[in-house]
């Protein structure tokens, strides 16, 4: 599974910009992926998911891209708002358990 | 729907004491519940998986005698940190699934500080 990092990568953007958060996964057999948003002191919130038979899925202001060849996921947030400031995690789902990636802190300045 | 609640939201305890954290599924029955630990600026690490009415399955490196998990009903799982030490200070998060393999819903987390 993913190794846990000792620091959190940070992405700083201006309000209104588009944000792209990246994630690498390790298990080529993984077939379901989820992006979560975690605000300070709270549990993770589901944002969007994607199955391995897709390479793109869109939600409201968010798009997830999956590149199985290089085992890479990205989360794109359009027109980023200050309320989007949080830590974002990708997660691989096995049969019953989730393996979380390292996380990226998104800081949105007005 | 699908609300998971943890109690308490935060707790401070003295070194050597035990502390219990509750995880409740408020509007659904949870066959499976998961417990995670998260240190500052790090990811969530799965500690154990508990299925209602059976013993929890612990991840490698997690001491089952230190982190006691009870999933006695379909709406409640508890995590007891026994003989807590300062290094057990962390953010503990639970999640619950209606059935094995289905979507998991997360609680809001419990901040444990051992002094």
Image (spheres, rainbow, N blue to C red):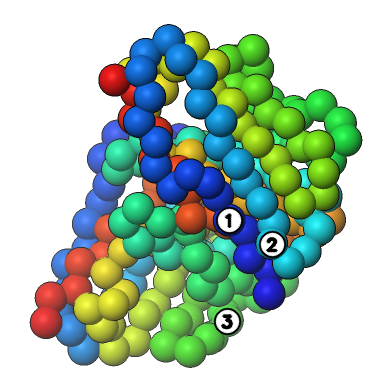
Numbered disc 2: what chain? B
Instruction: From the top left corner, tell me how far across and down residue B24 is, in percent.
Output: 66, 51
Where residue B10 sits: x, y (%)?
A: 39, 42
The residues tagged by marks 2 and 3 sit, at their Cα atoms, a distance apart of: 30 Å
Please identify the quadrant where the C terminus of chain A is shown. bottom left
What residue sits 43% from the left and 71% below the top?
A: A75
Which residue is identified by label 3? A57
Q: Label 1 to label 2, Cα distance in Å?
A: 7 Å
Residue at figure coordinates x 44%, y 48% from the top left: B9
* 2 or 3: mark nearer the eye: 2
Question: Which residue is disc 1 drawn over?
Answer: B5
> Residue at 72% of width from left, 71% of height from top?
A53
Name the residue beneath numbered marker 2.
B26
> Are there few (<14), some (14-19), or many (20+) residues within 10 Å of tag 3?
some
Q: Earlier in the sequence, mark 1 or mark 2?
A: 1
- What is the quadrant of the N terminus of chain A in the image? top right
- Judge by depth and name the residue closer to the eye, B37 or A103: B37
- How many other residues sit within 10 Å of disc 2, few (<14), some (14-19) or many (≥20)? some
Assign a secondary structure to mark 3: strand
Residue A48 higher or lower than A80, as above or below: above
**Are the residues tagged 1 and 2 within 8 Å (C-beta)?**
yes
Circle 2 SS class:
loop
Instruction: Work out which residue is located at the far right of the displayed protein and give it.
Output: B53
Q: Is residue A35 above or below residue B71?
A: below
Residue A59 location (% of width, % of height): 53, 86
Q: Residue at x 48, y 55 (%)?
A: B108
The chain letter for the residue carrying disc 1 is B
Query: Is A30 left or right of B91, judged from the image as shown?
Result: right
The answer to whether residue B70 is above or below residue B25 is above
Mark sitting on residue A93: none
Chain under numbered label 3: A
Label 1 Cα neighbours within 10 Å, binned few <14 / some 14-19 / many ≥20: many
């Amino acid at each position: 599974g993913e190794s846990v990092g000792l620091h959190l990568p940070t992405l700083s953007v201006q309000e209104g910009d588009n944000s792209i958060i990246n994630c690498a996964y390790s298990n080529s057999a993984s077939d379901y992926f989820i992006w979560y948003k975690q605000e300070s002191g709270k549990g993770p919130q589901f944002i969007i998911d994607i199955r391995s038979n897709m390479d793109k899925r869109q939600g409201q202001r968010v798009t997830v891209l999956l590149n199985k060849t290089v085992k890479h996921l990205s989360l794109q947030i359009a027109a980023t708002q200050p309320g989007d400031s949080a830590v974002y995690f990708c997660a691989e789902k096995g049969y019953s358990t989730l393996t979380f990636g390292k996380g990226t802190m998104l800081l949105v300045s007005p | 729907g699908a609300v998971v609640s943890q109690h308490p939201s935060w707790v401070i305890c003295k070194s050597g004491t035990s502390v219990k954290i509750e995880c409740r599924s408020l509007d659904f029955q949870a066959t499976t519940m998961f417990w995670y630990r998260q240190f500052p600026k790090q990811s969530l690490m799965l500690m154990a998986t508990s299925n209602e009415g059976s013993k929890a399955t612990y991840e490698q490196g997690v001491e089952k005698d230190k982190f006691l998990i009870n999933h006695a009903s379909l709406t409640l799982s508890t995590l007891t940190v026994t003989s807590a030490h300062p290094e057990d200070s962390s953010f503990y998060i639970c999640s619950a699934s209606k059935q094995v393999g289905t979507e998991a819903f997360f609680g809001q987390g419990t901040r444990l500080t051992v002094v």
